[in-house]
Amino acid sequence: MFKRFLPTVVAMLAAILVLLGYLLPVELFAMLRDVILLRWAVVVAAFALFLAYCSLLGVHFLRMTSAGKKKVASLLIILSALGTLILVVVQGVEGVWTRQVLNAVLIPGESALLALTAVTLIVAGMRVLRARRTVGAIVFVVAAAIILLTTIAYSVYPSVLAVLRQGVDTLATAGMRGLVIGVALGVTLTGLRVLLGIDRPYSDE
Amino acid sequence: MMNQTLMQLMAFGVVLVAAIAFAVYGMRSRKQPMATRQVPVFRSLSDEVGRVAEEGASIHVALGNGSLIGDDAMTSVAALQGLSGLIDLSAVYDTPPLITTSDPTLYLLAGDWLRRAYSRLGSADLYRPAAVQFTAASPITYAATAATYLADGGISSNVVLGAFTQEVTLLTTAAEKRSIHSSGGTTSPQGLGALYPALDQEQLVIGEDLFAGSAAVSSLSSALASLKAQDILRWLAILGIIGTALISLVRSGGA
């Protein structure tokens, strides 16, 4: 009874209070949302992060002890996860070495990966023309090419490309807004189902 | 300040209309089954389980980085609902998918979802916690790490469904390199821009279609009603946009 009833009541109450905090111009709801519920959510998220961190270590310990490949990678992940944790516990998030790890390892590493996504996107765009010669694929590649080329050339010939750029921006913004409105409606209805207790992703009933 | 209050009340109005439409279609769908738009990807996901089980391989499911306490919470919940058929069937065949995510709260929910699928069959002891993995907290590192799992072998299907941006291209490229079949979708324009060239159109879930997963997989009256209400609201939004544009046009012409 409690297993089914309690999570549903907590989820519904929290969802209704947060929603009212956003939708009604009443100070009390906004305060409840910001002071109590969001703080609770942060505590829950912190606990979830701790569990996820333990799981990450557990998975890589298992990989190291099993007969599979990539044991060195798993060892490196474990060492870096533990090393970073010790650093943060000893020095805090603003410590000199913590910031050094962030600035010298994490940020450059992630920037490199982001740069890699640009390359893989271009390769995927070129491949799509070879594999799928549909109208949609052609429109996609032409639009991507126009945006890429005008972005680069705009700094050199701003007056010439201003009109083309404005046209492309208008179309892109219209498309994005259409997509986002559709998603917002989907989010609203899915949220309503959870809020009314019809969908209970946290329980089996 | 006035503007914000007005916006809040308008949003309240949208939620209210959505609730009414949902209630009306909910009552109707109980009386007679409703026809809604079809998103074939969700049905084909379940077929993947059989194919993969025959091959003795496994499915990689990337759930993305949609936190359950953030803006993408419902995207992640909808993705899991769309994957429920795949997860349930995987438990039946005892070929659990490898589920990866970069958000700790989603990691817990996905793990619970898979464990419950085993529990429903009365074989909770067969559930392996390592089937659900939190790989990294940053989306880009997550995608890069999950892409290495595709290179490890033993995976013959790659499903990317949830909150992603352009980092998803690392996953689809890794899958393509190893001739692993990919399918999925996301809600962000950046993520869709990356997925569109990588996936076949029949295998791609675009934007709001991601929220049709529950109706496609379960055919529950509540899910069908919600999808129908979503379609009605979409038409109302279209009419609202056209109406506003016409009013602006008339006003600018008169000025």
Image (tube, coloured by chain):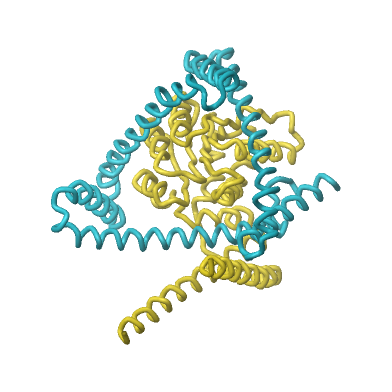
Chain colours: A cyan, B yellow
Image spot of residue B216 (x, y percent)? 57, 56
Image spot of residue A135 (x, y percent)? 28, 58
Q: Nearer the viewer, residue B6 or B223?
A: B6
Q: Nearer the viewer, residue B14 or A157?
A: A157
- Say which quarter of the image contains residue B21: bottom right
What residue do we see at 40% from left, 30% from top? A110
Residue farthest right in this picture: A1
* Above or below: residue A17 compared with residue B170: below
* Above or below: residue A114 compared with residue A146: above
Q: Nearer the viewer, residue B206 or A31?
A: A31
What residue do we see at 69% from left, 36% from top? B115
Instruction: Locate residue B234 relative to residue B246 in the image: left or right.
Output: right
Image spot of residue A186 (x, y percent)? 55, 59
What residue do we see at 52% from left, 30% from top? B136
Image spot of residue B108 (x, y percent)? 65, 36
Residue farthest bottom in this picture: B254
